[in-house]
Amino acid sequence: MELIKICFLLLFGVVLQAECERHSLYYIYTALSKPVSLPGIHEFTAMGLLDDREIDYYNSQDKVKIPRQHWMKENLTADYWEKGTQSRKSKEQWFKVNVNILMDRMRHNQSDVHVLQWRHGCEAERHSDGSVRFVSGVDQYSYDGSDFLSFDDATMQWVAPVDQAVPTKRKWDDVPILNQYTKGYLEKECVDWLSKFMTYGEEDLKKHTPPDVFAFAKRATTPNKLTLTCMATGFYPKDVTLNIRKNRITLHDKEVNSTGVRPNSDGTYQLRKSVEIPEAEKADYDCWVYHRTLKEPTISVWDGRCSDCQTEAAFGGLIGGVIGALFTLAVVAVVVFVLHKKGLIARNANPDANGQNGPVNTPLMPAVGQQNSEERGRSQGSLEETNGLKTSNSSDSGHGSGNGSSDSSNEDVSKAKESPTV
């Protein structure tokens, strides 16, 4: 009887998994303390991401909020984008003020480049009957790549991981209506927008694509060693399982280096895992990959060749063409450049088989700002340690979790959402 019960639960779990899918909607804002003279890197950028696909974008040079998906442009009016533009302009000014306030609080000088980020949004489960259920919400800020402040949805309190954030936490927690609104945005309004956008892009978002799988090796930095790499690329959605196997036995995770799942420029994803092996290794290695688009796992067997032992450049060009350009999102370029330059993050010193660097750890933190209906949550004031309220009431038509008035809220509601300065 117990065995039957266990089997039933396992079966029930599978049924549940098949009956619902998890989706996410996030907004990310990134501000630099001063401009940098590099093409494509802006002093301020903002973007919306639905299931990690960019759906809207704004930067401080063009100063226009634009759709990144045709179904966003087709389903939302010109008024929506105009209000979104005005809201993003307002946030840009908010960030400009507050990144300087934080620099003073951190005792940082004006000669260096510093980064203030804000990320907010929600995850939800969409069931076969069309209903959508809230799973989790995020509203967090970071400074120079380190956590600065985050919202605890369960307790409706702000969490300050560093001493410099404590004054902000106290001021924001002293206005309970703001925290209530932030919770309401994350659990209800964000989910409503997520559901609406999913409906707009349903056809594109349903286009699941299977991975292409490659096995290749190149010389390692360690003498008499090779770096064997398994790569799965071009798949969507992003959930995938990839194992490196030796004689059909999966290698332990501690032996393997992983890039983590990363975006390709076409909206698909890639994942690479690698392991160092003796140059004279004669064992059979292969790459075992499973993705929901596959009826059975795909296995790619390593042919025993070393790509750069003779023709590294030619092979690198081939793989590079297969992968395409990675990390085209402007926010990634900004954060990677600035934090790497400041020594806050480090690239993998060993280039991968396509001549690109390995994964970059770029923690995102919430930004203090305002947004429109989809992204409104709370309209935060500046980070100054004063008792006044310093906010802007412009609306933003992007989504996000928290900071700012909404184009769909009345003036009195917008004022009620304003939060004290940090």
Image (spheres, rainbow, N blue to C red):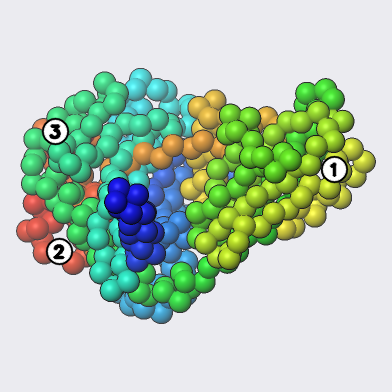
Instruction: Find numbered disc 2 in the image and state the secondary structure of the residue it sits on.
Output: loop
**Residue 374 x %, y %:** 27, 62
Residue 146, numbered label: none
**Residue 308 x %, y %:** 86, 40
Q: Amino acid at mark 2?
A: Ser
**Could one spot residue 290 in this view of the protein?**
yes
* Screen quadrant of the C terminus: top left
Whether residue 282 sits left or right of residue 374 in the image: it is: right
385 in relation to 413, above or below: above
1 or 2: mark nearer the eye: 1
- Marks 3 and 2 close (CB-CB < 8 Å): no
- How far apart are the two marked residues, 3 and 1, measured between alpha carbons? 62 Å
Q: Amino acid at mark 1?
A: Gly
Which class describes the residues within 10 Å of circle 3: few (<14), some (14-19), or many (20+)? some
Q: Would you name the residue on which mark 2 appears?
A: 409
Q: Who is closer to the viewer here, 264 or 340?
A: 264
Whether residue 145 sits left or right of residue 217 in the image: it is: left
Q: Amino acid at mark 3?
A: Lys
Q: Quadrant of residue 258?
A: top right
Whether residue 176 sits left or right of residue 228 in the image: it is: left
338 in relation to 16, above or below: above
Q: Would you name the residue on which mark 1 appears?
A: 304
Q: Would you name the residue on which mark 3 appears?
A: 171
